[in-house]
Amino acid sequence: MVELYHFWSSVCSVRCRMALEEKGVKWTSRYIDLFKFDQMKPEYLALNPDGVVPTLVHNGKPICESTIINEYIDAAFEGPKLIPDDPLKAARMREFIRKCETSFDAIVKLTLVKYLLPKLRNRWGDEELVKQAQRRPTRSVESRA
């Protein structure tokens, strides 16, 4: 059983959905509505203590962080390889992913500021947003069994 907890517009969620589709993995969508603060619900925080999307759950075990999820998908399931066999091509792929993770952070923040935040402000107001932000976990669990 494969479940992906995701938000439709999350760039990181899109990356994982693409990897699952590329590998031909049958999966169940578990939509996390960031506009309703689903990521702060105790049942989701039990899977992902950071309260972010995506989270992949395979056979009851959660895997967090999109790059790690995609590496797991590549290793755990049949289908076309996502990581090239050629060491140089694999290195170039990892360089690209690293740039996405470090430089892409600006795009993620821009998406938050220009897309998510205005919708959240319109729906909830600043006072409620501050209250919800205070619920956000500040540390993740060091290890998961």
Image: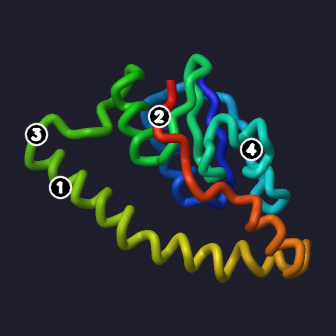
Q: CA distance from mark 3 to mark 1?
A: 10 Å
**Cα–Cα span, label 4 and label 3:** 36 Å
- Badge 3 amino acid: Asp
Instruction: Give the mark, 2 or 3, whose residue is nearer the N terminus.
Output: 3
- In the image, what residue type sits under mark 1? Arg
Mark 2 sits on what residue? 143
> Residue 86's mark?
3
Whole-percent x and y of residue 73? Answer: 42, 31
Identify residue for label 4: 31
Q: Are marks 4 and 1 in contact (CB under 8 Å)?
A: no
Query: Which residue occupies the foreground of this view, 61 or 91?
Result: 61
- Residue 26 image position (x, y, % from top left): 58, 25
Residue in front for this viewpoint, 22 or 15: 15
Discs 2, 3 touching: Cβ within 8 Å: no
Give the residue type at disc 4. Answer: Tyr
Name the residue rendered at 20%, 39% in the picture.
84
